[in-house]
Each structure stands twice: as C-alpha cells, then as structure tokens.
Amino acid sequence: MKAAETSGLPTDPGKNFQFERHYTAAPRQLGPISLYQFGELSCEAGYEIAAHRQWCQEISYVVSGGGHFIDNAQAIPVKEGELIFNPAGHTHAISADCGEAIRFAYLGFELAPLETPLEEDLLPLRLFYQRSGCLHAAGCQEIFQPFRKGLEEFYLMEPAHLLMAQAYLLQILLLSYRALSGALSSAAPSSAAPPCGDSPPAGLAEGVAVGKAVYAAIRYIDRHLLEIQNVQQLSRTLGYNRTYLSHLFKSRMNRTLEEYLTQQKMERAKELLLRDHLSIAKTAELLQYASASAFSRAFRSYAGVPPSAFIKQGQR
C-alpha cells in the first residue's frame, strides 16, 4: 500500500514544517509493529492542534521548544528532551507555548499479537502500552537518535529501508518503555503515605486518605502487575505497612488486597495462555510465581481447573 506523505512547508501557516508517513486506512506491518504514522512536526509559537480522538497508541518526543499535550482535558506541560505517551481512545490536542515554537517527533503504533518465541520478550511492552494511561517522562534525549534515523529511512527510501526502519522503531518502543515505566515507579506516593506502624492513626481510616491509599494500590497493580510478587512487596513499594494497607483495602473494596491481586494475576494469566499462546512455565515466570507448580495450584484454586485443562477448553 502506498503511504500518504506530507513534507516540506505545509499549507497551514501555523506549521513551520512537517514530514510524515501515515497509513490511516490500514497499518503498515513491520514485524511485530503495526505502524499508523511516523513523522516530525514544527509549530509556531501559540499554534494549537485541535482536539481529536486518538485512534492508535502514540509516543511523542519534544525535540525543541515547549508547550502542552492535552489528554482527556488534562494539560501536561512538555519541553525539550521529554517524552509523552498517549493511549488509543483518548481525546488528544497539542499547543505550543506563546513565547516559542515547539518541534516534536511522533510514532503512532500498535504492537501486534505475538506469533514467534523470539517475540516473547516484547510481551511486557505490549501489555504496558495497552493498559497504560497518558504517561510523561523527562531526560529522554537518547530517544531522539532512533527517531531521527528512522525518519531518514522513510525520507531517503534507500534499499532495505523498511527493515532498517523496523529496527529503529523497536528501539523507540524499548527505550520509551524503560523511560515511562521508570517514571511510573518513581512517582509512587511517598509524602502522603501514613506511618508504617501496625495500626492506622486515629481517624485516618475514613474519607479521602482511605480513597487515596486504595486507589494507589489499584493503579499500581493495573500498571505493574508483571512486576509484583506478593502483597508484602506491593505494600513496601507504595510506602505502606502491609496490615494497614490490607485493612483499608478491605474496608473500601469488600475484598482483601490479596484476593484482588490474585484475581488480576489470574485474569491476566488467561490472556497469556489463550490469546498470546504462552506456555504454563512462561506465564508463571511473567506473573512472578516461584514455580510453574505454584502457579498451577493458584490457577486451579481460582478457576476450578488446572491451566492445562483451561487451555484445552479454550481450543475447542
């Protein structure tokens, strides 16, 4: 399929330049990457890109200048060297600061279902991008190099340019995953965390403090499920005492924190076993179980059948 391309000086006077390859009718398949758009844009000071629905996952890197990326009405200030991820389905807009232009490179993509054992290492990336909200990270200058090299491949279109471009796109996705997941880890609540005693301070087990603690636990589980070994590790990461956090969670959610964590792990296990066709041993490893047998016991207790039987049922 021929790509739709814009380059050089666009007709819109608010854009200094734009080069883009986009495949809006159907994505261009480059290995495990479904490519929707890849380009670079420079906008004049004060220019605004109108709000629109994000129809694929998008990573943007600010090359120079500054402005705001708006995600579902939340304005996120950005500047040179910063990275931002916008998930599919959100409302997205961009504005340059009044005092300076903004230049940024962007990649619109999806990671396709994994089909070969060599692609299993990409599974954490696929799950991360599918399940994350809008994310922002600073100090990401190293990501511009694969952006620049990848754009050169599409611009020059030399022999084997698609193969070279695929390598650079994978670098962008991997480096972005490391930067964004690292930013998430460092953003875990700390200053608002209660003391790590055996019981909560008087009056703190109600109201806003309870909601914040419970939401912090749910959000961290949703975004870092593959990194969590148990409730003890989760509580320590969030800065809470295990007993205290479990008490708050049960009071608000009518189930224990351990039950919720197990449910999320088992539901993810079903996806890994059936949709991604991973082995029982690989699934156990990704979900941080000590062994395949320990995972199988937990799965049988939750689902009523061992994972081997579950796989057979799903293949019928």
Image: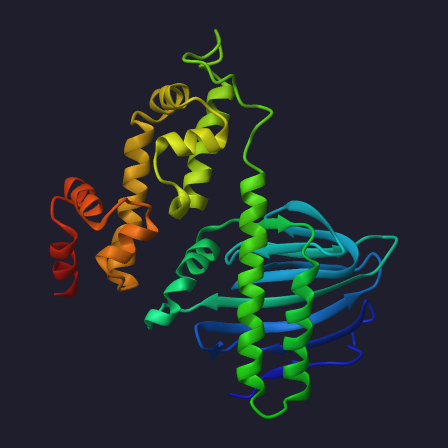
Q: Is residue 290 above or below residue 18?
A: above
Provide residue 117's location: percent of width, then percent of height.
33, 70
Residue closest to the eye, 53 or 71: 71
Q: In the picture provided, is 195 more to the left or to the right than 290? A: right
Residue farthest along the bottom direction in this orientation: 159
Specify the quadrant of the image occupied by residue 86.
bottom right
Residue closest to the eye, 160 or 293: 293
Residue farthest along the top direction in this orientation: 202
Residue farthest along the right direction in this orientation: 99
Tell me the quarter of the image containing the C terminus: bottom left
Q: How many circles with numbers are drawn on the protein?
A: 0
Residue at image coords 68%, 84%: 155
Q: In the picture provided, is 289 more to the left or to the right than 108? A: left
Residue at image coords 41%, 69%: 112
Provide residue 286's location: percent of width, then percent of height.
34, 52
Instruction: Decide if residue 54 is in sight here.
Output: no
Provide residue 128's location: percent of width, then percent of height.
46, 54
Provide residue 311's location: percent of width, then percent of height.
16, 59
Q: In the picture provided, is 71 more to the left or to the right than 25? A: right
Residue closest to the eye, 17 or 155: 155
- Colour option used: rainbow
Instruction: Decide if residue 196 is in sight here.
Output: yes
